[in-house]
Image (cartoon, grey):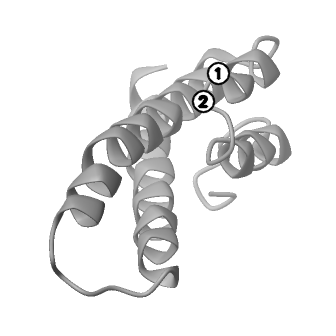
Amino acid sequence: MSLFGLPDLLAVSKAATVVLGEMFVPNILAAGLLMAARYVVAVTSVAAIIYITGSIPCMLASDVKFRLRDPFFIWYERTFLSILISGIIGLIVF
């Protein structure tokens, strides 16, 4: 994200790592950041909430065998893509 010039990159990355454990703490961490950085944190938080509340119960309810690391790998991919896409959109809009 440093290629795009996103402000407060360290704070955004800290908030993105916290989002797996708690869904509201990243938004509290981003309270004093610039608007583009707050937008990226908010989109990443919402993407994680949608993933955890939608995908995990479906995986557990199905008979498909998966390893424990698979949901974490999917979460990592979704977080990376949501930061990338929302970072670009945040810099264009804000």
Dot 2 and dot 1 residues touching (CB under 8 Å): yes
Picture quadrant where residue 89 is located:
top left
Q: Residues within 10 Å of mark 2 (few under 14, many from 20)?
A: some
Locate the N terminus and report the quarter of the image it occupies.
bottom right
Q: Is residue 85 depicted above or below 73 in this figure?
A: above
Q: Is residue 25 depicted above or below 31 in this figure?
A: below
- Amino acid carrying mark 2 in the image: Met
Q: Residues within 10 Å of mark 1 (few under 14, many from 20)?
A: some
- For label 1, the residue is 24
Picture quadrant where residue 25 is located:
top right
Q: Position of residue 2 (x, y in %)?
A: 69, 58
Residue 31 relative to residue 44: left or right = right
At 58% from the left and 25% from the top, the residue drawn is: 36
Residue 65 relative to residue 21: left or right = left
At 73% from the left and 36% from the top, the residue drawn is: 7
Q: Position of residue 52 (x, y in %)?
A: 41, 46
Q: Position of residue 35 (x, y in %)?
A: 61, 16
- For label 2, the residue is 23
Q: Nearer the viewer, residue 84 or 63?
A: 63
At 59% from the left and 32% from the top, the residue drawn is: 41
Q: Position of residue 20 (x, y in %)?
A: 62, 48
